[in-house]
Each structure stands twice: as C-alpha cells, then as structure tokens.
Amino acid sequence: MTNHDRFLSRAAERMQQSAIRKMGAVVASGRDIISFAPGYPAPDTFPWDAFSEIAAELFASRDPGVLQYGPTRGYRPLLDVIASIQHSRGMDTAIEELLVTTGSQQGLDLVARVLIDPGDVILVELPTYVGAITAFRNVQAAMIGVPQEEDGIDLAALDATLQRLRGEGRRVKFVYVVPNFQNPTGLLIGLQKRERLLEWAQRRDMLLVEDDPYRELYFEDSADEAAVRPIKAADRSGRVVYLSSFSKTLAPGYRVAWIAAPPPLAAKLEMAKQAEDLLTGSLDQRIVYEACRRGILERQLPLLRRHYADKRDVMERALTRDLGDAVSWPKPKGGFFLWLTLPAGIDADRMLPRAIEEGVVYVAGEAFYVDTLRQGQGKNTMRLSFSAPTHDRIEAGVSRLARAVRGELAALATKVAAATPGAP
Amino acid sequence: MTNHDRFLSRAAERMQQSAIRKMGAVVASGRDIISFAPGYPAPDTFPWDAFSEIAAELFASRDPGVLQYGPTRGYRPLLDVIASIQHSRGMDTAIEELLVTTGSQQGLDLVARVLIDPGDVILVELPTYVGAITAFRNVQAAMIGVPQEEDGIDLAALDATLQRLRGEGRRVKFVYVVPNFQNPTGLLIGLQKRERLLEWAQRRDMLLVEDDPYRELYFEDSADEAAVRPIKAADRSGRVVYLSSFSKTLAPGYRVAWIAAPPPLAAKLEMAKQAEDLLTGSLDQRIVYEACRRGILERQLPLLRRHYADKRDVMERALTRDLGDAVSWPKPKGGFFLWLTLPAGIDADRMLPRAIEEGVVYVAGEAFYVDTLRQGQGKNTMRLSFSAPTHDRIEAGVSRLARAVRGELAALATKVAAATPGAP
C-alpha cells in the first residue's frame, strides 16, 4: 500500500477533526444520549408545510434555473432579498458587496483563504467558535485569543496584544468576533464597545470579521433589536466583513448564508468560491428566496425567539435546581448556547466518559480555546446547547449532567484523600 | 476607504475569474445569444415529476434529517448507494473511502488543499478542465501540461516531463486526468493506456487524480460500458483518487458528487470539508438518494445517452455543412463537448466579439491551456458544448459561428493584403 503521508500538504498535516463533529459519532451510536453538544436548531420549528408548498411550485414551474448551474455570486432575486435584510439591520449593502455562501462555514473558509497566508495572525475572542478555528487553522493561521468581559472582547487587552505582536514583526490580518450571542459563551458585545472596536480597527488599520448567525434570536426579556445592531452598520470605510445565515432561522440543511464585504474583497471571495464549489445549491437558494418573499421568514422570527427563550429558561431552572452554587454561567440573552463554569479542578473533557455513562453529552470548553500560551484554560468549562432538545429532555439531561458532576467531584475527593499523607 | 490589497493572501492575489463563468455574464446580458460555452446538462431531460414527488414525500415525513445538519462524510444511505455505484463501475469501495462533496468542484478543491503546497507541481492533460485549473491555482500549484494523443495523454511525454521536473528538484504531487470524454476535448483514454498509466504511477511513486463526471454518457455507436472502465478499478495499492458526480446524470443544482480515496486521504479530505462547508445540503442528498433508490437514475441513463448522442450528431452535421474542411475535431464518443480546431491564424479569443455580434458564444481554447512554456498554444481552438441547446439552436448557432469564422478570415486576408508591399 502506498504511504500517503508523504503526499500531504502542510495544511493537511495540521488538519484535525472538530470536537463538536466528533461528538456526533457518540450520539449516533444508538444509545439514549441527551445531546447538548451541537448547536442544532429545533426541527419542530421548521416551517415544513410552507417549504413543501414552495418546492412543489418550483418543480411544477419547470424553470431550468431551479436545478441548473447558476452564477457563483448567487441567485439574483435572493441577493436582492439579502440586500433588504441587510438594510433592515442598518446596513446599506450594494449587490456587488454580496456573495451567497454554502453556509456560513464556507463564508469563514473563503475569508480565511482570501485574507490569510500561513503564519499570519488572527485575533479571536477567547473562547471562540470552533468552526472558525477550523477554517483559520486549515490555512495555517496563527490564532491568538483575547479575553472577554461581560460586554464582550476586552479592548485594552486587544490593543495590547496587537501592539505586542506588531512589535515582534508579526503580520496581524483581522479580528474575528461574534458580537451577538457568541458561540460558545452566549455573550453580547455592548453597543458602546462595538463603536469603540470599529474606531480601533480604523486607527490601527485592521479588518474586522463579524460573524452574525444568531442576531435574529434575541430573547425579548433581555435584549432587543437595538442591542444587536451590527458593527458593520457604522462602517463607512470598508473595515468590516460581515457574515450571516439562514441556517438558524429557516433551516441549516439548505446551506444558504451570505457575506457582505467591500467590493474588492467580495470579488476575490467570489473567485475563491468559484474554485470551491462553483455555486450554492440552486434549489436551496430558490426555496430560501421564496420563504423570504412569501413572508415565511418574517413569521418565523417571533416564534423562534419565544421557542429558544423558553428552552433557555428550562435549562437555567434545571441547572439551579440540580447544581445550584456549584456552577455559574452568564445568562444567555439570545442564541443557542449556555456557557457553564464547573467547580475548579473538574476537567470537562476528562469528565466526558462519565457523562456519556450517565447519558448526556456536551462540548468541553477547551475546544473553544485557541491560545497555545494559555493552554489548560477553560478546562472546567463546557458549552451546553439548549436549542434542539425538548423541555423534558433538557431537564433530564441536566439531571444526568449533575450526576456526572457529583460523581466526578467524589472521585476527585477520593484521589485527593489518597494522595494526602497520613489520611486513613 | 481602506486599501484592501494589502490584506490579501498570496493565493488571493493570484485568483482569477474563470473564462467559462465570465461567459455567463455575456449570455445573461439579455440579447439572443446561442451559448455553446458552459457544459450545462439539458434541463428538459431532468426528471421533474419524480423529483417533485420525492420532495413532497421528504417534507411530509417531517424527518428532521431532511433539513438538519448532518455528518460531514455524507448521508449514510447515500454513501451506501454510492458504494454500489462504485461497484457497478468495477471498484470495490469501502464506506471509509467515500466522501460526499458539494459538486465535483469541491472534490477538486479538497484534493488540492489536502495534497498541494504552494509551488508543488501538478501534471495535467493539455488542454485540461478549467475548474481543475482554478482549484489548483488557488492553492498556488504549478501546473505543467502533457500533450494528448488520439487515445489520451502521451505517456512518453508524461514520463519525460516527470523525470525532467524531478531532475530539477521539483516536487510533483499527482497527475490529473479526465479519462472519459475529457473536458474540453471529448477524448477517451484507451483501455491499454489506462493500465499503463496506473503501472507508471506505481513505478514512479505518483498519485493519480481521476475525474470522471461523464462516464455514464457514452454514445452507443462509438463507446460502451467496457471502454469507460475507471483507472481506479485496477488500483490495488491506493494510487488513485477518484471523483464522480450526479450533476450530469440527475441535475447540477443539487451539488451532490463524491470522492473515493484511500482511507488516510479520505480522512483528511473529510477534515478539509468540515472547514469548508460542514456538510453537503441535506435535502439535496436525500433527493439524490431517493432518485437512486427508486430507480430514477437507472431509467435516466439510456435516455441521456441517446439525447446527447443525437445532439452531437446535429452539431457534427452542421459543422460539416457550414464549415466543411476549414475546421476539424475528434469525434466525441460521449459527454458534452466538441473540441474544434479552426484555420491557423484565427485566434478564437480575439474572434469572440465578432461571434457575440453574430449571436453565438463558446469558450476559447486558450482557457484550457496551463503551460506557461507553451503559451499561445491552442489559440485556434475552441470548446463547443452541444449538451444544453435544442437541435434547432445548435444548427442556428453553428451557422452563426460559421459567419463569424468567415468574417474573421476575410478580416485577416485584408490585413495580410494591406501588409504586403506593392499590393494594390
């Protein structure tokens, strides 16, 4: 058999499987496992009947474009709809700034390929989205994390990090941020801080990559439309590349998302996409377009906000009931995720077999930390997705998690006792 | 405004728009243009009713997987179907060797990312598929072309090229071939040559990337099942990465294709795909799976073979009628393309405005030539796709093309006469 290692690119040598996708294999194993691991939308919220009607009409039309190749930029009527969505979010976006992508994951990958050379530094929130880590790592970026405060990324630390890196002669390309209900922490960057971040980017001649898949899913008891205003809405000088998606509001299986970028970058992103997959699925783009045109998306949003806010409530109540003061988390004001900090000493990754034994999975926090200087950070954290399971399953899952945590604490106590000289 | 050039990666600096996709803009301009440019399947052959029925049942099932995220490798039942398609083509392929891709374009891109470092050499047929050129160029590969004979790539030239490059210390990663009805020439690699190519790869410790989108579309008057046997069917030592697709047999708008690769490479290709788009569209994969399971694909194939063979006949007759001995081409034994050689002196790219004036477009042959040492080669060639236009449009398009060629020849004669000293 051929030894294939010798043929691999340096990028491929460094490629790793994502911790979240690995978790999929555990859940698929057939046991009764309650999964808080992947950020899946709730399939019972999908507008099945509307989609079915749209698909029937599209097929009946015999319009070749429904199943044919099409332009790399995207289906033109869909681009127009996206421009109007951008407008409703406070951004005036020309068509030549837009590109439909095959999910926001492709958006991140295209951004990575167009902006990053091996060794370039990307600054990211600490912790940050694993999909971005994967995309940036696959082009051999160096990622440096910047801690977050209650209202998002620490600007003083950000500036100090940039200055230090520039002092070392490193080329820093952009800051990657998820300002709305960040994955994994659920945090929201404060409005004032958004402005200051943009001013900083201008002053320091940096780009910002703003990833915004969750913005429509604000929970009305704690956030509103104004609180989720994109950084790009104030961008007058082409500093911000903005990504958003229909995956969390219509359905992820269509793989339809978009990038809004300054025209010279949008042109390069299109060329990168041309090589990557020629175009996003034609039927998928048409269905998403029709769902927007017919007001389906509009009708979904308030339902989704309530649906996910209720699930957050169920998870918070269960955590308080079953784990009380042993754990803490910032209250999610929107999105899919709750970021749990466990008692110090617990290693969420090492606890995973025990959790699986109890019948529950999560993503250990470590996966979201990129900073090699800080390795070991976040060991006692985990990301819990409350989006997909039912209320009952969320409650049962938290009880299972609590049993795993208590079991782990007991095991740690025994180990400490055994290691203490003179203990009985 | 920010100067974005400074932020571009070296790969992005080199990215270019594909000649074929540019042509799309001309056709979209609204004039009556007959397009022989893109390799589009004929939309009137799509099994619209079957697709409609399948989609209705999938939506009615409310099966979350129809619209949810799913495994990066692909929908498991679809992978099983692909394994059986592989088997019917003479290849025994284990599931861990397979990966569903978002069109074969993604397959080429993943292969490029997993195997190529900047500066690595890839050997390609001359001329070769532009989508592959784009994917390989985007990872900064150096491409070197090897001429083709009547039965495909010239093995003596291939070996001489490899030895020369190795002598120069270059790292040559693989040979990219389209053995069945090559894009753009329509050529078929002879069966004996396939065997010798594989033996050569083994002897010289090379990989082969075998791109096979057209194999089902052999024309029964000039080729058969035996003639399109994949090189990979004889591969016992993991030398061949094989790509194929449902785009040409079901519909391209679904973006469903696959790679079969030795397990260590398949694992890396999966990791690359994870970063690139997480998964191929869920609904698309389900529709394609159902179309296979229900025998729709099976029923399509003989219809498609006749459909495209008839169109090839129409184009050949029209070319003989309108251009006679002025042009030549190898008879397409399958696929979508006819590779036309024009009278010497005509530059197909420079003739394009005249052709557009006449109301016809094609892809000038130059786009398919990668070899910088041979620039200028293929200037008097063009790729004509006979797949999408109706019989009438093919006839009319060839007449328009003939007018453009005659106009171009007349203009050249005038220019020559004007440049001849002493001419009246």
Image (cartoon, coloured by chain):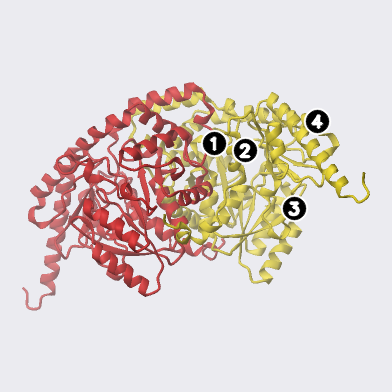
Chain colours: A yellow, B red
Labels 1 & 2 near each other (Cβ < 8 A): yes
Q: Quadrant of the C terminus of chain A?
A: top right
Residue shown at the point (34%, 43%) measured from the top left: B91
Counting residues from the start of the chain, the first of labels 3 and 4 encountered is: 4
Q: Is residue B199 above or below residue A180?
A: below
Instruction: Please give left or right for residue B93 compared with residue A202 in the image.
Output: left
The type of residue carrying mark 3 is Gln
Q: Which residue is mark 2?
A: A38
- For the residues labelled 1 and 4, the Cα–Cα distance comes to 30 Å
Which one is in front, A75 or A393?
Answer: A393
Query: How would you rate the neighbour count of disc 3 (Cα within 10 Å): few for under 14, some for 14-19, many for 20 or more?
Result: some
Tell me the mark number nearer the camera, choosing from 1 and 4: 4
- For the residues labelled 1 and 3, the Cα–Cα distance comes to 29 Å
Residue A37 visible to an observer of this rendering: yes
Labels 1 & 3 near each other (Cβ < 8 A): no
Residue shown at the point (26%, 53%) measured from the top left: B194
Which mark is drawn over residue A322?
4
Instruction: Please give left or right for residue B397 compared with residue A46 in the image.
Output: left
Q: Are marks 3 and 4 on the same chain?
A: yes
Chain assignment, label 4: A
Instruction: Please give left or right for residue A79 compared with residue A227 in the image.
Output: left
Counting residues from the start of the chain, the first of labels 2 and 4 encountered is: 2
Give the SS element for disc 2.
Answer: loop
Q: Which residue is mark 1?
A: B69
Q: Is residue B99 above or below residue A12?
A: above
